[in-house]
Amino acid sequence: MHAPDGFLNVGTAVTTGAISAGAVGASLRQMRTTLRDRQVPLAGLAAAFIFAAQMVNFPVAAGTTGHLLGGALAAILLGPAAGAVVVTVVVVVQALAFADGGLTALGYNVLNMAIVTAFGGYGVFALARRLLPGTASGVVAATAVAAGLSVPLSAMAFAIEWLFGATVPVPFDTVFGAMVGVHLLIGVGEGAISAMAVGAILAARPDLVHGARDLTPGQTADRARIGLRGVTIGAVLAATVLATVVSQFTASAPDGLERVGLDQGLMAEARDHPLASGPFAEYATDGVRNEQVSLAVAGGAGVAVTLLIGLGVGAAVRDRRTHGAAGDRRPTGV
Amino acid sequence: MSAAVEIRGVHFTYPDGRTALSGLDLRVDVGERVALLGPNGAGKTTLALHLNGINLADAGSVHIGDLPVTEAVLADIRRRVGLVFQDADDQLFMPTVAEDVAFGPANLGLRGSELAARVTEALRAVGAADLGDRAPHHLSGGERRRVALATVLAMRPDVLVLDEPTSGLDPAGHRELVEVLRSLPITQLIITHDLPFALELCARSVIVDGGRVVADAPTSDILSDEELLGRHRLALPFGFDPRMARPSR
Amino acid sequence: MGAGHAHPLYVHGHSPIHHLAPEVKIAAAVAYIAAAAVTPRQAIWAFGVQAAGVAAAIAVARLGPRFVLRRLTVVVPFVAFALCIPFIASGERIDVVGLSLSREGLWGAWNVVSKATIGASVSILLAGTTEVPRLLTGLSRLRVPGTLTAIAAFMVRYLEVIAGELGRMRTAMAARGYAPRWLWQARPVATSAGALFVRSYERGERVHAAMLSRGYTGTMPDLGGRRATAREWILAAAASGVAWLVALAAITGTGA
Ligand SMILES: Nc1ncnc2c1ncn2[C@@H]1O[C@H](COP(=O)(O)OP(=O)(O)OP(=O)(O)O)[C@@H](O)[C@H]1O
Ligand SMILES: [Mg+2]
């Protein structure tokens, strides 16, 4: 997911950079009101935790392993604004100090890995909490759904950026199908591990779970023991079905040969103006027949991502208004 | 003698409802070195956090010199009272040792050569003048302890409070620490589970248990009272006889 | 994916590049990579010049080609993706040793691989010659918000502490025969991650107390340090300027 330099075109890098900078700036301001003078040590340690959590290998199947991404988890534990800041710091340091992910790709990497997962994930979480019972089990289940969906959500964001900024002629449908399909499955692991981690924290220090601050001690104590195996298999099945449906877009992309004639003109034009293409790059409308499907999918995905981010931002803003009441959990003076 | 620290009837309950201090009284004179003993969970660390206003008493009062510890005078209190924490990793949070030592005096407004002089002076006082450029997490346990002490000395406090300074030190590190603390002419309150260490450094010891002071006497008397020690879950190392050891001056 | 390492790339050394002010190095690195990013893909010679420039700088910094090549493996997943592009991409087909490949796709793959490699090499040069705290100082001198760089500094400071705690938990689990194979056996892993968060948060609270007791009021003091000289800025501008000249020449060359 740490895309390298030059993966998307310059216009997209600059545009996503501006969006990310704005979102991180707003998140910093928001975090300042909730954490106040504790923000540096607490967010710093939380960032170290997320960085370390990305090194936690968990078993997936038959001995293969995966690792956490942590964006939704950070948002549920710390709130969407602080979560976004914390994951941004992780992504930026990985690029600068570990050469992991391109420096000029930071705009979209931060957007996809920090902003979309934190705010989008928190949006899903807020929605799921409304539908689920107000208990510890409800919070754990909402975490599973939110963390699980945050991964394909991030892939969707990437696919939409691809629509505007692809530097290679792979149609949007193919990228969308492959990215979202694969990430639906990865999301199962992310959801399971995040949910169980939040469950463990709720048992030890329920006051540290931002997304469960509204629970009374009685509600926190109510924890159902879930048969993990059944739930996991169910989730994998559901994700597989969804992934298959989504991957249909990949298959629906017509064979390249068939379209040679159609594309020739467009391509030649695009080649001649490598800088002039702007954010609406040359391949967005690759294939006339496919155009409508592409745009419909892109539009739908865009609306979904935006709505969920909006929900997450809404939750963050509500926080700001009510902070000092529930938002302040500092134990001691000053 | 005037009081460096005067604590009267302090009560403190943590937000989760756990009462840690219940009517604690203690007076420490200027220049005195006092050992604070007591079992795990007695409230020793909680008390230390009251001395520079990290915790504020629910009832009772804490005075540093003639200044009562209140929200309004915290900056001044924190300059006067230096707190060395139980875990040196909590105390050393800056990228390099020199920056860490500079953190406190910089918050007091020092800059430039004045700040640099402070840092050198503090590092020299703990025998760590050559560690300035190192990263704190690459230091040995003993070096960490000494640097943690330097970060506090750099603020030139009137009162030094140390929370379990000997935990994890080897015998040589232990020896060095005793020497450093002996050489400092300021009031010291030393929280420790290490009774020989207390005897070596402090003429007077106080036992805290259940959030209040339960004994306050010359260290050699306290260490000779096996029944008192046993009652508060304290014990001398096997074969150690406090009457044979040379008490501190 | 960025998992699996807790050690920054920094390699101790005394080359002129090591001693450059960090803000200059960051700005030059970003400018250099940006130049490669806008270079049109047909201008193979331009990428050659830019790559030679990075290689020369790496030689001056004495990072060693093995070190750089080993670290370049971070781009492997994307190179693998790039290698698929000629097969799945649309457009005119050409025959290469019996395979029908998309001409556009081949150019696209070349584009991704060349830019990613130059970008990653410059990043490795930057990270390999600049200690993390200096990188963060550089960022804040480039007007990145101080809160962000302070959080990053704390993260870096405590990374080893937290990774160490994590390692001990894992050893303890393995010592008791825990060897999971399936996702539904992952509860102990997740529980230890939860415990790790609680420990990290509580450490954050203790660190905050330690900061308060040394007079912290919410802003980190500026401890100064050497700022970049005009000479350093000019040197950096010259280095990235070469890359830009090449890029502009390539753009006008192919545009004509
Ligand atoms: N942050 C906190 N929140 C709630 N309770 C706390 C907190 N810190 C300490 N306590 C409780 O307050 C009591 C006193 O703790 P304190 O840390 O002061 O003991 P101590 O004498 O320093 O023990 P030790 O020798 O183990 O360090 C204990 O019961 C402890 O569980
Ligand atoms: Mg203690």
Image (cartoon, coloured by chain):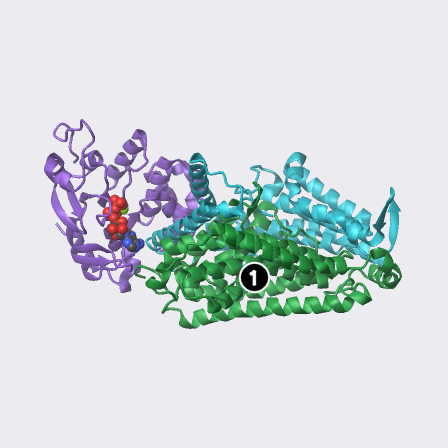
Chain colours: A green, B purple, C cyan
Q: Name the residue: 38% across, 42% down.
A: B120
Instruction: Answer whether residue B45 is visible to the viewer in this image.
Output: no
In the image, taking residue C125 as reference, residue B58 lies left or right, namely left
Q: Name the residue: 39% across, 49% down.
A: C199
Instruction: Answer whether residue A33 is visible to the viewer in this image.
Output: yes
Q: Nearer the viewer, residue C65 or A303?
A: A303
Q: Is residue A218 above or below residue C121?
A: below
Q: Name the residue: 20% across, 33% down.
A: B196
In the image, taking residue A11 as reference, residue A306 lies left or right, namely left
Query: 10 Å neighbourhood of mark 1: few (<14), some, or many (≥20)?
Result: many
Badge count: 1
Q: Position of residue A317 (x, y in %)?
A: 48, 71
In the image, taking residue C192 as reference, residue A25 lies left or right, namely right
Q: Is mark 1 within 8 Å of ligand 1?
A: no
Query: Secondary structure beneath disc 1?
Result: helix
Q: Position of residue C99 (x, y in %)?
A: 85, 45
Q: Numbered disc 1: what chain?
A: A
Q: Position of residue A321 (x, y in %)?
A: 43, 73
Amino acid found under the numbered disc labelled 1: Ile
Q: Name the residue: 18% across, 50% down.
A: B210
User: Which quadrant would residue B135 be assigned to in this image?
Assistant: top left
Q: Nearer the viewer, residue A62 or B190?
A: A62
Read off the residue under disc 1: A115
Q: Position of residue A45 (x, y in %)?
A: 44, 52
Which image quarter is the C terminus of chain B in? Answer: top left
In the image, taking residue A104 as reference, residue B116 lies left or right, namely left
